[in-house]
Image (tube, rainbow, N blue to C red):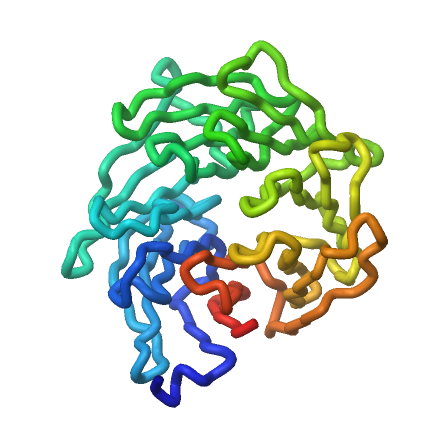
Amino acid sequence: MSESKKKEIYTYVAPWPVYGLSVSVREGAKYAFRYAMGSFIEEYCNKVQVVQLDDETGEFFTRGLFDHPYPTTKIMWRPDADASGKDLLATTGDYLRLWEVVDGGEINQVCLLNNNKQSEYCAPLTAFDWNQKDLDVVGTASIDTTCTIWDINTQKAKTQLIAHDKAVYDIAFGRHKDEFATVGADGSVRMFDLRHLEHSTIMYESPKLVPLLRLSWNQLDTNYLATMLMDSPTTVILDIRMPLAPVAELTGHTGCVNSISWAPHSSCHICTAGDDSQALIWDLSAMPEPIEDPILAYTAGSEVNQLVWGASQPDWVSIVFENKMQILRV
């Protein structure tokens, strides 16, 4: 192992402020420590850049770059370790787009998915999730109160439903390929089953119906969901077997929480990051006893906009703030 591999922190400085972030989960050294990051520029033309850490030098190098209309609200690599298929990346902003990374660094748009052909206006997409149990399925969330479930093979919508009374801010698939959950501006967490879309289950409503911004479903113990309230330092942990009341509340931040990610290799660890410039790792194994303090804390140079804890490198957490991405050994 090279000396550079022993570093605890690697930093990449982008040419613009960064918001979107995803780490590739494809197997093989060719794809290790490969990240897609999206710019946050307050104008139409934004960028998505693919960078990778060079194991020998400890420096990041650019693998590809493409223009993107508006900032990406989310970026996600295809959640599949098998490197034999197409190397795909998805983004949301005005629409859901799929991109293919080909050898040599070229990145081509595969398709633009739009289910609203009647209107010249589009309702911005706030987030999406790629179904790990059915890789042909992507679900998007929109400010127009709807969620759309796409078959990316046929490039057609499987279904579109009104999910909330107000804007939908996030969507996450769960333990079964037909189950997904959403959060929104109405302050609720709702669960859906694609086989029975005539009804949904309200899993939680925030105090005073404060909007819920993000949702993360524990993929190793699918009884647990995490969500965060708008402008709040608290992360709420829910047990779907006991809806409506949180099983834990994580209150270690001194500014609002911006991002949450469950550990990919441990069912009882979660990372949170926020406006207090902190990334905190929590051990939830004592639940339902109160979780008082994080077990690890890192202070970044500014407010942390996004974090990723990827399955391909479970010993590393990635964060973005200002125009920087850092990967931190945990």
**In the image: residue 252, left or right of residue 45:** right
**In the image: residue 18, left or right of residue 220:** left
The one nearer the camera, 314 or 198, is 314
Residue 127, percent across and down? Answer: 50, 38
Residue 113, percent across and down? Answer: 33, 28
Residue at the location (35% across, 84% down)? 1
**In the image: residue 111, left or right of residue 190:** left
Report which quarter residue 202 is drawn in: top right
User: Tag count in the figure?
Assistant: 0
Spot the residue most to the top.
198
Say above or below: 153 vs 67: above
Q: Is residue 104 visible?
A: yes
Residue 136, percent across and down? Answer: 33, 31
Residue at the location (32% across, 78% down)? 55
Residue at the location (46% across, 53% down)? 20
Quadrant holding the C terminus: bottom right
Residue at the location (50% across, 68% down)? 316
